[in-house]
Amino acid sequence: MEAILPKTLYRESLHSPIGAMLTPIFGMHYFLTLASRDKRDKVDPKDFTIEDLNGETAGRAPGSINGQQFIIRNCQDSNIYILDHMATITIDDCVNCRIFLGPTKSSVFIRDCKDCKFALACQQLRTRDCHRIDFFLFCSTFPSIESSVGFKLECFQCYYPELEDQFKAAGLGIYDNNWSRVHDFSIVPGESNYGFLPLNSNLAEYIPLPDVEKFNVAMNGSKEFSVVPYTLGSRPKPSDESCLVVFFNDGLSQERAHKFIAEMNKTGEFVIVQSKEVSMQPQDVVRVFNNDSYAMVAEQGPVIGFEFNGNGVCAACQDSLMAINKGSTGAVFASSSPAAAAQQIESFYNFVDIKMAV
């Protein structure tokens, strides 16, 4: 709405990024806003809803959602691909569907679904009244299930060109995956409502990869190319030997962590049990590692920690660090022996759990 006001009382601010605004003089609080300021992008709920599918394939391509909320409901026998980042998503009353969800900043709610397969990444997963569900899961907090049975889980594993940037847009750190640490609100004594898919299950065996032409994306579902590192989670460890490796933030820690994982995966003899990116203060470093050598560098930013497992893993970690850093381990801590690693892993991940609880 436009108005004409006395020039003697107002002067025009020509630097407003939105439109002309009259700045009050003599303490009077009036504003003139051009009509263009009131024009805002309108969101059509239909663009962010998929419902009532039966034997169909549908979804959204990268760049089509951009952090909006989304809804999927009342679908059966269908393939659904949401290939973008979202704020939250609710999925209700779906049967025998294969559903891929891009990174979700907050919560994924799944209710009253049966015989479905999901691949998803989120800050929080909550399910209720669901039966026989398979998950390829990234969850930065502990997944919550309620009144649900027959769940089988595996670590999220996927690559497509836009995925890493979508994780960043959703505020999810690729090393903060607690996919296997399930909180079950409906525990039955002597029974378990969830378990694990076979080790090294491939995403494409459970959810068909999306058509490149239809969704304008080339997806790879193998762990070797995954944006999120593949972790063993709460499964039994294959060896009694583990090693803690922590990359301190020197501006290249993300790059070096990625190279280190690739180097350790070359032989196929070692697995990542768990990983975490977390901020530490100098006093935390001294307490966790019983060493002040890395105390000051900890102030430069979050550290990235891994528990690697396998026979001879400590020596292999040292060799891999020397290889990627061309003769120097750099700003990296690595356990010297399995005996030392056991205490260091416990101390580091106890610290992580305390940080998560705060």
Image (cartoon, rainbow, N blue to C red):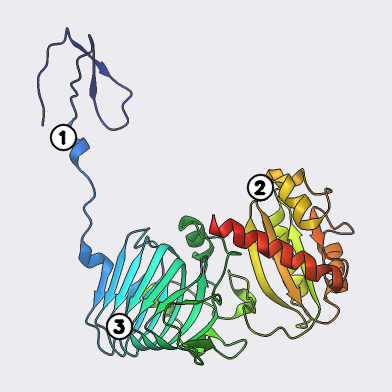
Most distant residue in the front direction: 189
Label 1 crowd (10 A; few <14 / some 14-19 / many >=20): few
On the image, the x and y values in percent for residue 256 come to 73, 59
Q: Say which quarter of the image contains residue 341.
A: bottom right
Residue type marked 2: Gly
- Up-down relation of residue 40 to residue 98 (above or below): above
Query: Reading the chain from its start, which is encountered first: label 3 or label 2?
Result: 3
Label 2 crowd (10 A; few <14 / some 14-19 / many >=20): some
Quadrant in the picture for the C terminus: bottom right
Please name whichever residue, 15 or 97, is drawn nearer the observer in this view of the structure: 97
Closer mark to the observer between disc 3 and disc 2: 3
Q: Return the residue at label 2.
A: 301
Residue 102 appears in the figure: no
Query: Reading the chain from its start, which is encountered first: label 1 or label 2?
Result: 1
Residue 112's tag is 3
Q: Return the residue at label 1.
A: 35
Query: Reading the chain from its start, which is encountered first: label 3 or label 1?
Result: 1
Please name whichever residue, 133 or 58, is drawn nearer the observer in this view of the structure: 133
Q: Residue at x 64, y 84 (%)?
A: 235
